[in-house]
Image (tube, rainbow, N blue to C red):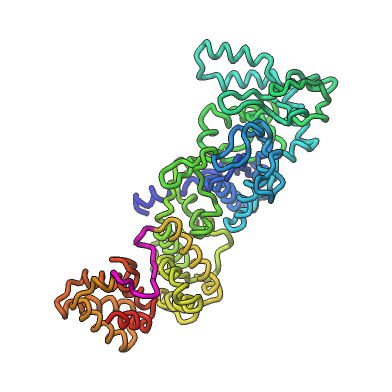
Amino acid sequence: MSGRDEQEFSIHWIQDVVDRVLARDVDDYLISAGKSPSGRIHIGILRELIVCDVIKRRLVERGKNARTMFVIDDYDPVRSFPPSTSLSLDKYAGVPYSDVPDEFGCCESYGAHWANELIETFPEFGIDPKIVWTSKLYETSEMLEEVRICLRKTETIRDIMVEYVARDFNEEQKQQYTEGMKTWFPASIVCPNCGRLQSGVKGGIEPNRVTEYDPNTDEVSFACPGCGHAATLPLSDVRIKLTWRVDWPAKWHLFKVTCEPAGKDHAVKGGSYDTGLEVSRRVFGWKGPVKVPYEWVQIGGRDMATSEGIVFIPKTWLEIAPPELYRFLMLKTDLKRTINIQPDRIPDLVDRYERFERSYYGIDNPTDEERELAELLYPLSEAETPSEHFIPKLSYKFAIVTSQLEALLGKEVVLERCKEAVRKQHDIEELCPETISHIPIRLSRARAWVSEFGSERDQIQVTEEVPQDVRQTLNEQDREFLATMLELLKGQPKNDEELQTAVFETAREIGMKPRRAFTVFYRLLISRKSGPRLGPLLNLLGPDWVAQRIESIL
């Protein structure tokens, strides 16, 4: 493998992570991921989920019991809403996402709505984790016991928080923080009066913390800073939630999580992940999961942020591109590197992945290095077990053009043109059922991509008649050129290359610049000076249709 390929395909991380997980040598391996549904969940979370899935797959290949889990932190309190949300922040700030109504009326809560939008895409991406809703988890006796452990060991947790949170404070800040921690407890209560876990919004948040816990009576005291309600109640009678730096390791301990990836914001040295590992050791008496840090996924060079409405969701990806391509992009890059997805490059990326696919099936004489890479990475990129035989697919770039001609030619004609294109591209006579069923999917994705991300050059619009302004620009030489091409189109059928060559040769024969000849044709067909490759476009539209178009202006 060349140095460039080694840099591009940094897949050694897969084996490195699996070896670290295997070193735990447990009977059941649980690989976990999690996300708070604060709004539309962007596609970056899929890097974490795909990493989990790949670890599981590799463990299962080795005969291990392995499974994945996805924790939806819908019990987190609202701190802000994305710009598009119609709900009032004043009304719901501090309320758990699981208690906020779904503004669209289709799910049981605001948190459930956005989580379900993500979960619905899992099958297509080849992901099948067990779903755990934190709001429901805290209703179980098992999670309540984890809370008791933390409340009993509050002093230890206070020491850990001072050690990790205040490590970069100056002396005055550290002293103030340490003093404040003397009465701090690692849990908050959902106020039975106003329904909030905390009051205020970003910059002025006051958690509704426990103020006292009696391990003998198992009672907690609290005072809500928002509405002023205060009470002392049995732990089993309140809705309680651990602070997030403690909530995380408590769930690790409860489920015995073997490994959990985490984005760089949590995985930074001394950050929330390391704090959680220390809580795991000193509070729960075990070492916690294998830490797997990863860099973020960007879209068009920008970091995504749900709270700011900068999102690109998995559902959008599925509308424009195959899920296996996204898995491939996540896996071929080392976890320490940012991945920048550029939607405008989807056609090139699809072509690239399908060349990679051909290497897996030994087509096009791949080198030993290319074959070895494909044998490792291709099965992990596919959502399901790869087919035993190669399944030819319609070219994405061909679909871009063809998908825009359905209104003109009709679905049946477009489908037949696509079938013929696949036969020519792959030099085959018969198409397998999988190839045929894939064509409408590819057309739909290509059409959606053009609409959302395609450039002006990619967009095609064929009018019923040649516009008057186009007719007026034609001179005598243009008409001579078109008349000659008309006779040629009425003759024996020609393939794409023959038509492309004929345009050049006809132009030269009458002393016309080839560039002008192509411009005349594009303006005649799609009212623009340029467009997709002309030979294939002429065959797509059909010689008879193109001939009638020319006759209409001569």
**Position in image of residue 142 (x %, y %):** 78, 36
Residue at x 53%, y 67% (from the top left corner): 441
Q: What is the quadrant of the C terminus in the image?
A: bottom left
Q: Residue furthest bottom?
A: 491
Question: Does residue 459 appear anywhere in the picture?
Answer: yes
Magenta stretch: give its range: 455-469
**Position in image of residue 317 (x %, y %):** 51, 55
**Position in image of residue 152 (x %, y %):** 75, 22
**Residue 163 falls in which quadrant of the image?**
top right
Question: Does residue 15 appear anywhere in the picture?
Answer: no
Q: Is residue 73 above or below residue 55?
A: above
Q: In the image, 325: left or right of 547?
A: right
**Position in image of residue 266 (x %, y %):** 55, 33
Q: Is residue 292 magenta?
A: no
Q: What is the quadrant of the N terminus in the image?
A: bottom left
Residue at x 67%, y 42% (from the top left corner): 26
**Residue 517 falls in which quadrant of the image?**
bottom left
Q: Is residue 179 above or below residue 286?
A: above
The image shows a total of numbered marks equal to 0
Q: Is residue 459 magenta?
A: yes
Q: Residue furthest left?
A: 511
Residue nearer the viewer, 274 or 193: 193
Residue nearer the viewer, 197 or 228: 228
Q: Is residue 200 above or below residue 108?
A: above
User: In terms of secondary structure, what is the magenta stretch mainly?
Assistant: loop
Residue at x 66%, y 30% (from the top left corner): 94
